[in-house]
Amino acid sequence: MLLTQQEYRWGDTIQVTVKNDIVDPEEGTSIHWHGLLQKDSPWMDGVPSITQCPIAPGESFTYSFIADSYGSSWYHSHYSAQYADGVFGPIVIHGPTAADYDIDIGPVLVTDYYHLNYTTINERAFNSNFSVVAVPGVNSLINGRNNYNCSLVDEGDTSPCVSNAGVSTFQFTAGKKHRLRFVNAGASALQTVSIDGHNLTVIANDFVPVVPYQTQYIKLGVGQRTDVIVEGLADATGSYFLRSQSPAKPCADTIQPNATAIIYYQNEYLPEPDPWPAFTDAVEVCANEPLETTVPLYPIASPFNPATTWDLNITLAQNETGSYLWYMNNVTFRGDYNHPILLLSNLGNNSYPNPEWNVENFRSNSSIRMVVNNANPRTHPMHLHGHNYLVEAVGNGTWDGIITRPDNPQRRDTQLVPGNGYMVISFTADNPGAWPFHCHVAWHVAAGLYITVLERPDDIANYKIPSTVAHTCRNWWAYTNSTVVDQIDSGL
């Protein structure tokens, strides 16, 4: 199911009650509010085993927090890979803007789509046969719609298939400037987005406004957002394709990688088919735009000498039973739904005996730099909760120590680290909490590509966490005392 759009204003108190009515089979659930910093409310981040216990079947939990950022984002389940089955939706938070536009078209969600449920895909992904570890998506969607070539359906796939299911449509006005809020809410695939006959002017990446720049296309890893302004053609009356294209391996793997929607001015009709653009000016297919291009509108300088620098290595390897899993610094994550890390830290327990919890305690360090090294050809969209980090360097091979535009590096909460490459990020440790840092490919984080950044635990101990959080744990404990929870993956 695609859940409803949430729309707020900067500074609003957001209250959302989530009722777990999942059946056949019953599962826990939670909702994460992607990109929101959750300052002074880390227990509302919505990550089971980290900031809360799962919401037990039949139970409810009310999330309450401040809209502390503005722009475009999304919310989604963070229980296993549950959101890949459709538990997600867009968020728009209105705030100050320097951008000039006339019409807000609203969120445009680009996603991959699977005919199998997420548990079946996870079971296939955790395999000792390397050739089947990456399960391909079936289709690509724009706002939940796209046609599909039913001849591509796998033998034995009983999912109903209609070749002319229809596509999403958006109306433009000639000569007017339109704001489109693109969100990659998929499970795995990188998406390249363009509009035939129109240029895109980028005004924000994630929740960070940028100095506007014009481009033919944008590239979005899972979890990333880009806001653009598109000027309507003067005196236009026709229709044009809005395209979202998922590239081939190692960036992604989708059986039908191309999705279309229709931009129309007066009469809604199918445009004449043109070849898919090749984007031959792309610096690298499996990467975001060059850091030199994306300049934050409001500058923050890179720390000259951060309090701590930490190397983080991503690898793919087989465990003791032969299954391929993802590792961060030689640990593959597995959460404990019954003992959330944040709640333990609040009680003064910051020594985690189980190495699978993969907690890095940064204590009272005032600033943190991470050098992320990816020893695998697959690109990873790396998302950090609780922060917009400075993206200081991205490239192939190993980091040479040079920071791109140190007086004002790109900032965002999700950035692609290239295959066989590196990403260097830094942030000020001004938000005490237990913050997940993970790949946003659903099947990768489910296979352990995750670590917890424990930030200022002495301050975490001073938090007065609402009693509803403990009540949710008691409900979950009661449920698990009578029901065996089959945790087939990392839990996230």
Image: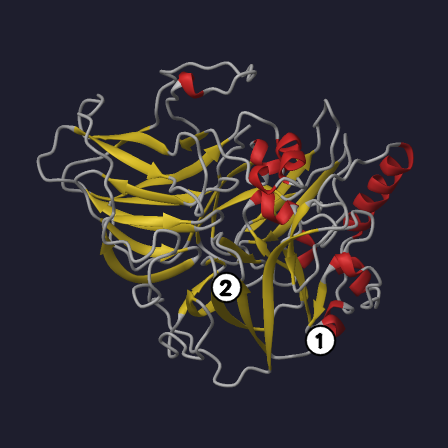
Q: In this view, does 155 lie to the left or right of 410?
A: right
Q: Is mark 2 on a helix, strand or loop?
A: loop
Tell me the amino acid under the disc marked 2. Answer: Asn
Q: Is residue 446 above or below residue 308?
A: above
Image mark for residue 363 = 1
Pointer 2 local density, CA inside 10 Å: few below 14, some 14–19, many at least 20: many
Tell me the amino acid under the disc marked 1. Answer: Arg
Q: Which quadrant of the figure has residue 491?
A: top right
Q: Residue placed at 46% from the left, 74% from the top?
A: 399
Q: Which quadrant of the figure has residue 309?
A: bottom right
Mark 2, residue position: 388
Q: Can residue 41 be seen in this view?
A: no
Q: Residue placed at 79% from the left, 44% from the top?
A: 472
The total of numbered circles placed on residues is: 2
Q: Residue placed at 68% from the left, 74% from the top?
A: 362
The percent coordinates of residue 96 (x first, y second) are 37, 58
- Of 81 and 135, which appears nearest the observer? 135
- Of 431 and 245, which appears nearest the observer? 245
Q: Is mark 1 on a helix, strand or loop?
A: loop
- Of 66 and 450, which appears nearest the observer? 450
